[in-house]
Amino acid sequence: RDDVESRGLGDVYKRQIVHSNEIKTIDWSINLPQNQVHRYMEILVKETLTISRVLQRYLPDLQYSLILSKIFEQYKRCLLDIYTQVKFKDSIEKAIMMKDIDYFREKLGDLKGYGNSGQVIWENVNALPTDEDIKMEQIMRSNIIQERSSTTPAVPVIQQQNAIPSSSPSLPPKNSASPLSKPFSPSPAATPV
């Protein structure tokens, strides 16, 4: 059983290196047909399903689940490491990668040991900025700085009150009683009997 586990994890690690190298060569600006993903992801999913069937056949359920959880943790680390090195020009390129991740989630999400690996990968890649995002943020910051520097500073309220000429009517002091500041008390006629 230990031999099955070490061989399984060793094979997965070797294959991840191959997939990682393939990911590095992908031109993310080339869109794929609607229901197609990149070759590395098709192979990764197929291999994972095969390993899962073999492990399930020869190992007790607990050990099978444990090995698969180790495999998915390896996937999570490796894919995140490679994916976060990619620099996207725009949201279309990011969407092409997200399609591969969605395929991973859809095909492998029901396997034992999967945990939240696909969700973590998806969230981290989705949060990556594109070159387009970075440029837009720089433009927005520049616009805000220009707007702030071109507007005149507002006069504080205290200075405005002091600037009121003495010939204008003044407001009553805050502590003086006005008809509106008296507490409301119902008239005796309005009190129910």
Image (cartoon, rainbow, N blue to C red):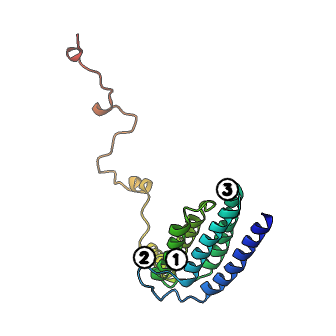
* Residue under the image location 68 percent in, 80 percent down: 15
Circle nearer the N terminus (3, 1): 3
Q: Viewed as shown, does residue 29 lie left or right of 16?
A: left
User: In the image as oriented, which residue stretches furthest toward the left?
Assistant: 189
Q: Depth check: 114 or 89 in front?
A: 114
Q: Which residue is mark 3?
A: 61
Work out whether mark 3 precedes mark 2 in sequence or the reverse, and give the earlier one.
3
Q: Mark 3: which amino acid?
A: Asp
Verify CB contact (< 8 Å) between mark 2 and mark 1. Answer: no
Location of residue 59 by image quarter: bottom right
Q: Which residue is mark 2?
A: 150
The residue pinned by badge 1 equals: 100
Assess disc 1: are there few (<14), some (14-19) or many (≥20) residues with their C-alpha within 10 Å of its C-alpha.
some
Determine if residue 27 is in view. Answer: yes
Q: CA distance from mark 2 to mark 1?
A: 47 Å
**Which of labels 3 and 2 is toward the front?**
3
- Residue 188 coordinates in the image, percent (x, y): 23, 14
Tell me residue 144's x, y (percent): 45, 74
Residue 69 against residue 80 in the figure, above or below: above
